[in-house]
Amino acid sequence: MTGGRGKGAALFAAACLMTLYSLGPVAVMVAVSLARDPLSTLSGGLTLAHYADLVRGPSLHFLDYLKNSFLVSALSSTLSIAVTSAAAFAVVQLRLPVRRQFVMAVLALSMIPQVSAVGYLFKLMARFGLINTRTALILPYSAWSAPLILWLLVSYFSRIPPDLYRAALVDGSSRWQSFTRVIFPAAAPGIFSAWLLSFIFSFNEFLFALVLTSDYRARTVPVGVALFQGLHGEIPWGILMASAALGSLPVIATAVIFQKRIVSGLMEGIVRG
């Protein structure tokens, strides 16, 4: 009994330390963003002036960064879903003898370091005149998240009874109509989970956005926040922390609201994969 209590206490202490390690920087970020004097934290009182300066400051372009992040993340996730859902359906229907190996090989592509591809990607985008455009981010984001989405969607499509697809064909539907009108709606919860994961990845991505954009017209929040300190003679800690807090809010809200769906999507891929 004593050993069990000691083990439980150790696990509880470890959980508390992990929580403190994870939430500590977030608490400091919020505290500094609300402090009148960021260097003295809360001793000088609270204020929303840093947030007001961030939103109203015409030279900071934070709202432009936020708009770019939402557009790029949403469009790249939608494009990736559109392509990989058809591919996943084909993989399931063809019943390849090496289906598992094929999916795992595609998933392994996501393990390639981004830094190894960014140079070639820059040359490609420059050749087509896409540098500093949202398209320069949408295309690589959708490609980079495609392996994970394919892995998840193959798992979800495998759960749909084959008789459902055959019944649609018997009723006179074409293969494409059967997919769009029957299979796709039946797998909608899994597809939405995959879309959320792709959205979070795209919203947080830094390297491609740093290399492929040059100003507020295409730059996203992570890069914009990182370069705030280069726009001033001194580091504006209050505005910097306010921008980090506002920039992370959409991802945190998405994770909190849809946490069960995100976890179930990942677990489904693990169990079926």
Image (tube, rainbow, N blue to C red):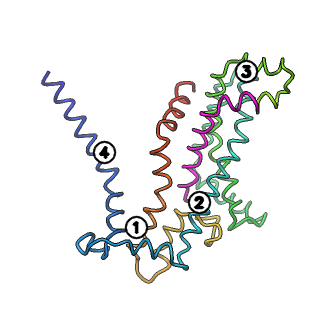
- Give the mark nearest the N terminus, 1 or 4: 4
**Amino acid at pointer 4:** Met
Q: Quadrant of residue 101?
A: top right
* Of marks 3 and 1, the one in the foreground: 1
Image check: 211 left or right of 125?
left
Residue 198 among those drawn in magenta: yes
> Is residue 190 a member of the stretch shown in magenta?
yes
Instruction: Name the residue located 52 percent from the left edge and 25 percent from the top edge.
Output: 271
Q: Are marks 3 and 1 in contact (CB under 8 Å)?
A: no
Q: Which residue is mark 3?
A: 95
Callout 1 amino acid? Met
Give the x, y percent position of residue 258: 50, 41
Front residue (pair 160, 182): 182
Residues at discs 2 and 1 in contact (Cβ within 8 Å)? no
- Spatial CA span between label 3 and label 4: 43 Å
Q: Which mark is residue 69?
A: 2
Relative image position of residue 89 (x, y in whole percent):
72, 29
Residue 18: which numbered mark, if any? Answer: 4
Discs 1, 4 touching: Cβ within 8 Å: no
Q: Tell me the amino acid under the disc marked 2.
A: Ser
